[in-house]
Image (spheres, helix red, strand yellow):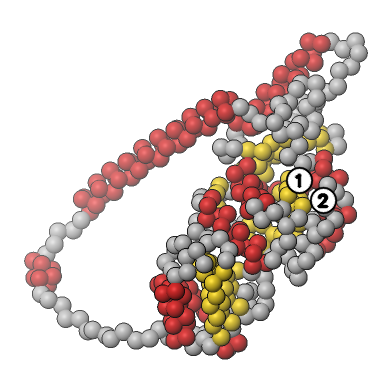
Amino acid sequence: MLSKNHPIILFIDRNGFGVYQDVLTNIPRFNFTPDLVTNLDVINKEQFSGLIATFIQINKIVPSSLGVILSDDVICVKDLTIPAQKPVPNQNPKADSTDDKEHRDEVQSFLENVPFEEILAKVIKTGTVNRIVAVNKNLVMAIIDAFTSKGSVVEAITPSFMYGQAINFTAGLTSDNVRAILGNLEPLRIGNLLTDQEKMISPPNLGGELIIPSANETKKPRNLRQYILIGIFVVSVIILVVVYLTLGVSQAPPQSPQAENTSAKPVSTQIVSPTAPITTMSADLESIQIKITQSSQVNDKAKAANLKSELLKMGFQNITDEVSGVLTPEKSSVIFSQDIPADLRNNIIAEVKKILPGTSILEDQELNSMINIIIGKS
């Protein structure tokens, strides 16, 4: 299933994902932000993929086989009330047909209510129960594609409940969890959402095959729900505006002559000359290393020079800049090591966004007093 040569375990939950590989000193984590992922929907796929590629590069993750574990809070699950049955001799065929139809109807009803445009779905047999699982395909594949573009190969995408009580994923991906996963790869194989994903379920053999509803079956109900919700929203906004204007006109107090005279008089204001921002940094600036990286494809020396100049004014001493040959990310980013204090981060972010307004803020798990500034296309 997974290669013995530096396999990668990727655990995706609602707030981000963690990555294990034996060549890493820890388990780095990528956190979702509202401008990237909201309610498990990818907002900006190009920017999202670029930041994950940067995350892979910074953590020096080696291309290998990839096993993906899905947390319970990113999947939609339902236990089917009518389990799949094998044909029994001398049994009434009409009863089998009725059970199969009810089973298919239950599955289709579930899939139509999954709130994503594209899904990966499968019926998995767990003990005596057939359980249908669905996940947002766009989110999962956007993450996986960033790894495969670097040379990794995805082997399995499996819900975490396949490991039952043997593994507790409450704390996310931990060293103990990884040892248990690598010690028992059978759940990855059985619950793999990638197997037979192009096949539709046939009535006699429901367990273990993927269910992918056709576009005609799912798109119409979802669009209808969207139109209804949009219509309700528009009507609600119109009602609120009318109520607000009505109350605003009726409750506005008449303006007194004295107030009119007062408003006509010029008001003197004191002009205060701007002063340098007061910083309350709780770290020794000389011990912090800052690296400014830009791609050879962009090589915007002016931005790099301005950044370095402003950071020197703030009191930083250890600042380096370099030109990298890697692909230029769409968006600039600042990556803080975990031990950089919050007050210092806020000051740096304020200065960086003056020069690179659309910068994303990230954090790695290192404790090396390091700040990486990567200059992107925007």
Q: Above or below — where is 309 with respect to 378? A: below
Q: Above or below — where is 331 with respect to 92? A: below
Which of the two labelled residues, at mark 2 and mark 1, occupies the earlier sequence position? 2
Q: Kindly report the distance in space between the C-alpha atoms of the residues bearing marks 2 and 1.
A: 9 Å
Which residue is depicted at the point 40% across and 84% down?
A: 277
Q: Position of residue 343 (x, y in %)?
A: 52, 79
Mark 2 — residue? 2
Left or right of 50: which side holds 256?
left
Q: Are marks 2 and 1 in contact (CB under 8 Å)?
A: yes
Q: Position of residue 227 (x, y in %)?
A: 44, 33
Query: Quadrant of the image for the C terminus?
Result: bottom left
Please identify, in this view, whether the residue under mark 2 or under mark 1 is nearer the observer. Answer: 2
Q: Position of residue 314 (x, y in %)?
A: 46, 85
Q: Quadrant of residue 231?
A: top left
Which residue is depicted at the point 77% across and 62% down?
A: 21
How packed mark 1 is, by other alpha carbons closer than 10 Å (few <14, some 14-19, many 20 or more), is many
Left or right of 305: which side holds 251?
left
Q: Quadrant of residue 324?
A: bottom right
- Secondary structure of the residue carrying numbered label 2: loop
Which residue is depicted at the point 33% across and 41% down?
A: 239
